[in-house]
């Protein structure tokens, strides 16, 4: 009899819990399912390839694809992202100008947009910097943005896109359950500065010996790992790799225009130097003619003839 009462009470409690759960709507967990397709066009230099390798090591949710032909139109990247089951595209575009190669970076949300085009400058890879910092391969990083990204609307849009591109989701295939580095994005001089730092904490025994009290919290320091580069925003498009322009940077000057002005300055210096040489020759000729005239007037036949 007692066992029957226990089973009946358990059934009533289970029915009550079921009714409460049906009455209260269950909250759906928001899952971060961002996957990034990274590729470049043909003609990238060795340093650019190393930069892509560093980013692939830092971001385990990136899927790297083979190089794209330079003659291929950019909207084809949306189809490649669909085939790779990616909803973000990171495309490195290299353009050759005689002995100089300019690097541009496209960040796009496939297939509907928006998309951003950057000019990449001051690229330094991990092998080149040889910093003392280090982090676990596949770990998730903390994204740090400057307060300037909360000001202008286009900077807020860039912040959201950087979060989708560089924020590693928990469900990524190659990710590890550690957070040991910080990805920093700073906006200064109309440019975005990217840095990667390791989170360094001291050993607990060392902390206890130095502080002497458990109430004090240990100080955490940051050590730079690399890579580092600078992004100059050029244009933000409404669509993916095209469409109406949402924002255009009025302060951006194309690197070809800068080099053209530099060549003009060099040409002006060369012209001034040649003009100075021509004036010097004319002065020397006049001096020689005057010396010849004086020598003729001072001949012995004219003086004592």
Image (tube, grey):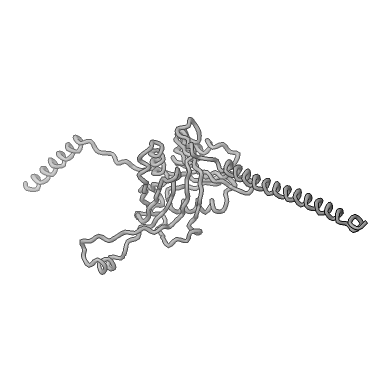
The image quadrant that residue 224 belongs to is: bottom left
Q: Position of residue 180 (x, y in %)?
A: 36, 56
Query: Looking at the image, which residue sits at the far bottom?
Result: 209
Q: Position of residue 242 (x, y in %)?
A: 50, 33
Residue 83 seen by the camera: no
Left or right, residue 234 beside residue 213: right
Left or right, residue 302 beside residue 153: right
Query: Looking at the image, which residue sits at the far top?
Result: 244
Left or right, residue 95 beside residue 11: right
Measuring 28% from the left and 39% from the top, which residue is drawn there?
28
Measuring 76% from the left and 52% from the top, which residue is drawn there?
284
Residue 244 seen by the camera: yes
Number of on-image labels = 0
Up-down relation of residue 158 to residue 175 (above or below): above
Q: Quadrant of the C terminus?
A: bottom right
Up-down relation of residue 239 to residue 14 (above or below): above
* Residue toward you, 35 or 198: 198
Up-down relation of residue 240 to residue 188 (above or below): above
* Residue toward you, 211 or 260: 260
Q: Position of residue 25 (x, y in %)?
A: 23, 36
Query: Looking at the image, which residue sits at the far front?
Result: 304
Query: Looking at the image, which residue sits at the far right?
Result: 305
* Residue toward you, 221 or 85: 221
Q: Position of residue 67 (x, y in %)?
A: 56, 46
């Amino acid at each position: 009899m007692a066992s029957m009462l226990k089973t009946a009470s358990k059934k009533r409690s289970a029915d009550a819990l079921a009714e409460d759960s049906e009455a209260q709507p269950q909250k759906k967990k928001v899952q971060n399912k961002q996957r990034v397709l990274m590729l470049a066009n043909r003609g990238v230099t060795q340093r650019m390839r190393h930069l892509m390798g560093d980013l692939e090591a830092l971001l385990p949710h990136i899927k790297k694809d083979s190089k794209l032909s330079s003659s291929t139109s950019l909207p084809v990247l949306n189809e490649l992202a669909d085939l790779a089951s990616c909803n973000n595209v990171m495309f490195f575009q290299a353009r050759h100008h005689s002995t100089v190669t300019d690097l541009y970076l496209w960040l796009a949300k496939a297939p509907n947009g928006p998309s951003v085009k950057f000019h990449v400058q001051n690229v330094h890879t991990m092998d080149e910097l040889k910093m003392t910092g280090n982090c676990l391969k596949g770990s998730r990083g903390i994204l740090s943005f400057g307060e300037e990204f909360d000001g202008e609307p286009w900077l807020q849009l860039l912040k959201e896109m950087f979060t989708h591109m560089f924020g590693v989701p928990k469900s990524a295939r190659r990710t590890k359950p550690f957070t040991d580095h910080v990805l920093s994005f700073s906006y200064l001089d109309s440019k975005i500065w990217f840095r990667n730092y390791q989170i360094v904490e001291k050993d607990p025994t060392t902390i206890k010996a130095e502080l002497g009290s458990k109430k004090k919290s240990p100080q955490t320091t940051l050590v730079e790992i690399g890579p580092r580069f600078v992004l100059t925003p050029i244009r933000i498009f409404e669509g993916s790799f095209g469409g109406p322009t949402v924002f255009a940077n009025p302060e951006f000057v194309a690197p070809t225009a800068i080099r053209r002005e530099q060549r003009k300055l060099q040409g002006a210096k060369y012209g001034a130097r040649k003009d100075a040489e021509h004036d010097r020759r004319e002065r020397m000729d006049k001096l020689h003619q005057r010396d010849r005239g004086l020598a003729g007037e001072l001949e012995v036949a004219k003086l004592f003839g």
